[in-house]
Image (cartoon, grey):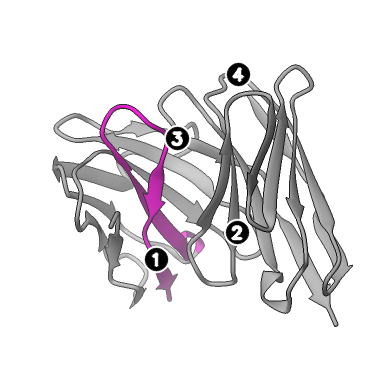
Amino acid sequence: GQNIDQPTEMTATEGAIVQINCTYQTSGFNGLFWYQQHAGEAPTFLSYNVLDGLEEKGRFSSFLSRSKGYSYLLLKELQMKDSASYLCAVANSGYALNFGKGTSLLVTP
Amino acid sequence: GAVVSQHPSRVICKSGTSVKIECRSLDFQATTMFWYRQFPKQSLMLMATSNEGSKATYEQGVEKDKFLINHASLTLSTLTVTSAHPEDSSFYICSAKMGTSGYEQYFGPGTRLTVT
């Protein structure tokens, strides 16, 4: 079965750093994805980790520990436009994605 | 590059009718397409995996006779919701994967279905 957990909501201040955690227990693993989704829109790709370690891409970084079934997404220098839902998803062997319930991030002035 | 379109973007239909949603990869060939749905304030749930020229693989709990998927070409997959009911009202999103290797898949903009 698939079990992907992430916090429901988080609030952070503009300019700050926020870390969104994701833990997973899945029967197959072909990488972990992070997506950003604004209300009523399709998800947009942020990052992909298949090996342990940190992947950095501009203001966004993602970390993976396969032995712990754990990932986090780190957002730096938060901007108001970063207010969105952040989805953690695990890919199965065919790259179909199993999504967590998403973390709604609110960035305040 | 790597653009996926969906049509229609919004549709309202009466209970008992059928609705077809198209998913197209505009500038690449998609050997695999995935269909997801998202209920309000919930995350995306995988419905089925569609490979060109073969039958779709449905996730547990998704009725294959109700949600008909056809992946007739490398650039087009269709999802038909047959005999729609209000509980089928949802946001349906497709994604397309390029080739057989690599991890990237590209999401369409989604179709908002409302069944009255």
Please name whichever residue, B7 or B16, is drawn nearer the observer in this view of the structure. Answer: B7
Disc 4 residue crowd, few under 14, some 14–19, many 20+, Cα 10 Å? few
Q: CA distance from mark 3 to mark 4?
A: 13 Å
| Disc sitting over residue A64 in the figure | none
Instruction: Please report whichever mark, 2 or 4, sits nearer to the chain's N-terminal start.
Output: 4
User: Is B30 situated left or right of A46 in this image?
Assistant: left
Disc 3 residue crowd, few under 14, some 14–19, many 20+, Cα 10 Å? many
Range shown magenta: B87-116
Q: How far across and down, in percent of the image, does residue A67 sit?
A: 75, 17
Q: How far across and down, in percent of the image, does residue A7 sit?
A: 82, 50
Instruction: Specify the amino acid type for callout 3.
Output: Ala
User: Is A28 situated left or right of A21 in this image?
Assistant: left
- Check whether the beta carbons of the residues at disc 1 and disc 3 lie within 8 A of each other: no
Q: CA distance from mark 2 to mark 3?
A: 17 Å
Which of the two discs, 2 and 4, sits closer to the camera?
Answer: 2
Q: How far across and down, in percent of the image, does residue A103 sit?
A: 74, 56
A58, above or below B9, in the image = above
For image coordinates 40% across by 64% down, the residue present is B110
Instruction: Specify the amino acid type for callout 4.
Output: Ser
- Check whether the beta carbons of the residues at disc 4 and disc 1 lie within 8 A of each other: no
Residues flagged by tags 1 and 3 on a common chain: no
In the rendered image, residue B111 lying in the magenta stretch gets the answer yes
For image coordinates 50% across by 26% down, the residue present is A92
Which residue is denoted by mark 3 in the rendering?
A: A96
Which residue is denoted by mark 2 in the rendering?
A: A36
Which residue is denoted by mark 1 in the rendering?
A: B109
Query: The residue marked by circle 4 belongs to what chain?
Result: A
Q: CA distance from mark 2 to mark 4?
A: 24 Å
Locate residue B102: give its quadrant.
Answer: top left
Residues flagged by tags 2 and 3 on a common chain: yes
For image coordinates 32% across by 65% down, the residue present is B16
Instruction: Describe the element under mark 2 as helix, strand or loop.
Output: strand
